[in-house]
Image (tube, coloured by chain):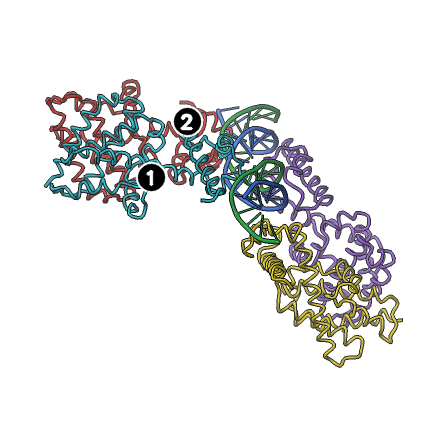
Chain colours: A yellow, B purple, C red, D cyan, E green, F blue
Amino acid sequence: MKKTDINKKQKREALLNTAFELFTTQGINKTTINNIVDAAGVAKGTFYLYFKDKYDIRNKLIAHKASRIFSVADAALSQTGLTELEDRIIFLADNIIGQFTEDKSLLGFISKNLSWGIFKNELISSSENSDVDFYNIYKILEHSPRAFKNPEILLFMIVELVSSTCYSSILYSEPTDIEAFKPYLFDAIRELIRSQEI
Amino acid sequence: MKKTDINKKQKREALLNTAFELFTTQGINKTTINNIVDAAGVAKGTFYLYFKDKYDIRNKLIAHKASRIFSVADAALSQTGLTELEDRIIFLADNIIGQFTEDKSLLGFISKNLSWGIFKNELISSSENSDVDFYNIYKILEHSPRAFKNPEILLFMIVELVSSTCYSSILYSEPTDIEAFKPYLFDAIRELIRSQEI
Amino acid sequence: MKKTDINKKQKREALLNTAFELFTTQGINKTTINNIVDAAGVAKGTFYLYFKDKYDIRNKLIAHKASRIFSVADAALSQTGLTELEDRIIFLADNIIGQFTEDKSLLGFISKNLSWGIFKNELISSSENSDVDFYNIYKILEHSPRAFKNPEILLFMIVELVSSTCYSSILYSEPTDIEAFKPYLFDAIRELIRSQEI
Amino acid sequence: MKKTDINKKQKREALLNTAFELFTTQGINKTTINNIVDAAGVAKGTFYLYFKDKYDIRNKLIAHKASRIFSVADAALSQTGLTELEDRIIFLADNIIGQFTEDKSLLGFISKNLSWGIFKNELISSSENSDVDFYNIYKILEHSPRAFKNPEILLFMIVELVSSTCYSSILYSEPTDIEAFKPYLFDAIRELIRSQEI
DNA sequence: TATGAATGAGGGTTCATTCAT
DNA sequence: CATGAATGAACCCTCATTCAT
């Protein structure tokens, strides 16, 4: 790779990191392009060489951060010897919850954006995009020996239930803090899975 | 009531309606105070007689619209002869889903705002605020002859599951349209309730 | 006086007092008509029944406050048995300085407005305006047995020297506090008077 | 210097000149940023690249204009062979009065702002700020062979007497025009100096 | 590629003034 | 006389975007 190419990558990287930092600390609406380029130490015009506008960089950040989370969770799963479907799914949920608990600003940022829309998009584009490991997760359900009425809907409900409840529980401890909530949630997930089994 | 008071109420009403219309069609960020007052046919300064800023009117709209939805659902429930807990909860969910299906812009607006934060707040303040009927819903669980490990957490999970999945299903038919999704959802709710029963 | 007339006078009085309070605490520029009427407890429109605008009420306040100061000083002078011209003038200066030291906000308000312009205006209109006692002060010079090249210019220089230096000394203790400054000032005044004697 | 830097300097200069023109003709309160940028032929946002707000540009103008006046007077003094203290001070006063008489709008602008506060500030910062020549004036008193009770207070009284009386005399010919007033003023200054001599 | 000065539309907000009650 | 809701022009300021360098 040429020296200029390395430089380019660094600039882009700096903008992404700075934008994430600012988005999570002061919110997207209150973050200006000025803030981003100042903190990143590049000129204003440079921003527009890499991103269309503020929402472009936000979307790229969400996709990037979300896929990293799944990637990490999936890598951890493969280290375990878990074979049981329910155990595997709950391990993933627990791992992802753990990541969000560690980094609450990340949760606030992708918050409810990590819903089915993005999930599905990434799942579809996973073949072309080496970043993403959603597909592995999807395969867990499909390749399980157990049969489900509709694996996609089951996955959908689990993802939505987990992301939606954890948002409230981790960030605001409502209706209870995440550690107290986990047993209820994991019970519910197991029950959900069984309810959809044929 | 004096004539001027009626006039005031009308102005406020006009601003609320117009703001809702604009928020739901072009989003809050892209809606300006100018847009609102122009469409409402009042002077710019008049806006500030009734609301502090754009976010003040938004919050008042969310609370108002959300409480109406529960109110309608609760009224419909009392018309039925349903006694079984699961049936009553599913009736409420179905009714609310119906309202959102009828008025998708409303769903987009209060969207994921209708989550536990507001739900809980309203529930707490319901005694002083005649607008709100959340409390009735909460009582359904508490006064049921069946006993649950933690009624609040159970309600929390149901509300989050319903609001989160329906958002995607109604607005984007993802992963499937709402009518096809309902049976899965209602099954899941019944299972959730049972899983939390002592 | 009729009851309504008393009420009118009270409203006007309330507006004047409130305006003075606000002008001296937050400055004229930052004081709004709204502030004034709110604090005075009258309706907005009422302000315009008594004053043309913010600057009208300010001018009326300056004239009123300034004439009171001279009036007080002159009354105090007549209580003394002082006959010597220099003593009488310095007594007046001292008394006025004392009043300003007691009420610094008053000094800040009429501040450098208490200059020759207003002084002269009031002096001229003193015959028709029972409020004002400038004329008495002027007479001190004219009716003194000593003769001066130009009594008006002498008075002018004294007034300007006193008002200008005391502003700085009382409010900011620059270049020194008022008590330390007084001896220098009074010396200077005596010298000034002598220098203008024929 | 780069071309863009020259351009920047020109823009700043244009804004300062335009602002001064407008401040002196219509007053600061009635001058808007819009007025300034329109007259200067730059965009509104450009103003904020160079100045924080209206009061920032005003302060910069006062300091700049005031220091120029002293600078000019001091330069003229050094051209004369005057050695006598009183002569030197009166030369300075006369020169400054001359400048204000030539440019009455300038007097109206810095008007009574040219009082001890700014005078002292500038005097203190004169060592670091090559713009200002107040210090030279101060040295005149300190390095004179004659001794004074308190040179600073003496200077203070002279500055206040001159600035305060000339304001009225030059701008309003009150109580008389400046030419007629000068002899009285200069007499008074000489007497003031002598009165403070030990 | 990278810069950053310049732009100017349009944002939110204020507030003196009016006028129907 | 007194009110205060309504007005809307004008304010200050921001900031995404452009473009000459």
Say which chain tag 2 marks.
D
Identify the image quadrant of the C terminus of chain D. top left
The residue identified by callout 1 is C105
CA separation in Å, label 2 and label 1: 30 Å
Residues indicated by labels 2 and 1 sit on the same polypeptide chain = no
Dot 2: element:
helix
The quadrant in which the N terminus of chain D is found is: top left
Tell me residue D110's x, y (percent): 34, 33
Q: Residue furthest top?
A: C128
Residue indicated by mark 2: D25
Residue C190's label in the rendered image is none
Q: Residues within 10 Å of mark 2 (few under 14, many from 20)?
A: some
Q: Is residue D172 above or below residue D193?
A: above
Q: Name the residue type under label 1.
A: Ser
**Closer to the eye: label 2 or 1:** 2
Amino acid under disc 2: Thr
Question: x and y percent of residue C53 in the render?
Answer: 45, 27
- Pinpoint residue A99: horizontal percent, then vertical percent: 65, 69
